[in-house]
Image (cartoon, grey):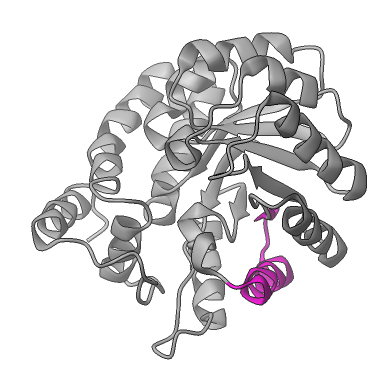
Amino acid sequence: MLDGVLAALITPFTPDDRIDKGGIQSNLDFLVEGGISGVVPSGTTGESATLTFQEHKEIIDITVEYSQVPVVAGTGSNSTVEALELTKYAADVGADAALLITPYYNKPNDDGLLKHFTKIADNADIPQILYNVPSRTCLNMKAEITAQLACHPNIVGIKEASGDLDQISDIIRLTRDEDFILLSGDDAMTLPIMELGGVGVISVVANIVPGKMTAMVTAFNEGDLDEAKRLEAQIAPLIKALFLETNPIPVKKAAELVGLAAGHLRLPLAPLGSGNEAKLVAELKSIGAL
């Protein structure tokens, strides 16, 4: 259920800065038509850091109610109490799983990480995917800590965005006897991670070219590595363009350009610079999205 290409959803806003329900629904239609296997609302790409607690819940509600594919709700926080409340909420309204980032800013030690995730897993009855992204949190969760958490029946996987293939290989090796999956948290590393034993990706670029991302992962899974690598080379320049500035600045501009619901960015994020926008437009045209 949680393998393949899961799109890390953007959050479209209306001009008066409300959640654009219709926009979320139309974007979901586009993604499902593109063949994605799941969606991840209210995560980093969805500007979770600027959503109110009620908005988090609203986005989860809209996505669960409307989505035709599994929903992995972003419910993480650097407050264990808040993360637990959101994760329980996601479980109550019918999300298929929750995505929980390592606590940012307060930088817990190993024991704190174990206790944080175990507290949530003990008290929220929903499959949970850990999320390790040191570039955002200034904290890298070690493979050994991930392996200990993988023993918990409610902790079923990890989104790995450390960029460290040695660490990723260690996680896969240490959790091979558990019912535990590893998903790439970096579009550009999807195939290398799958070659190590990863099962897919939580993807930013899938918001824009879901068909190409799903075709790449499908080709790999069917043993056609040449086709997978051909598609990877085709998608790579767009991936690079979507990370010219902090995610989700470029992907929201890309969504707007290709006619998807996007709306403005919330401060402190500001619009994409004109030079980078020109590069993004060029790559969207090159891949046939414009």
Closest to the observer, 21 or 272: 272
Image location of residue 156, percent across then percent down: 77, 33
- Left or right, 118 with respect to 74, comes to right
Residue name at image x 46 percent, y 55 percent? 45
The residue closer to the viewer here, 171 or 135, is: 135
Residue 204: x percent and y percent? 43, 48
Residue 138 drawn in magenta: no
185 in relation to 58, above or below: above
Considering the whole magenta stretch, tell me its main secondary structure.
helix
Picture coordinates of residue 111 (x, y %)? 75, 26
Q: Position of residue 65 (x, y in %)?
A: 73, 72
Residue projecting furthest to the bottom? 16
Q: Is residue 2 visible?
A: no
Front residue of 261 and 31: 261
Q: Quadrant of residue 39?
A: bottom right
In this view, 68 is above or below 44: below
Tally the marks: 0
Q: Give the position of the N terminus as an image quadrant.
A: top right
Q: Give the answer, above or below, for where 264 lies relative to 148.
A: below
Magenta segment, which residues? Answer: 52-74
Residue 284, by quadrant, is bottom left
Which residue is depicted at the point 66% across and 71% down? Answer: 53
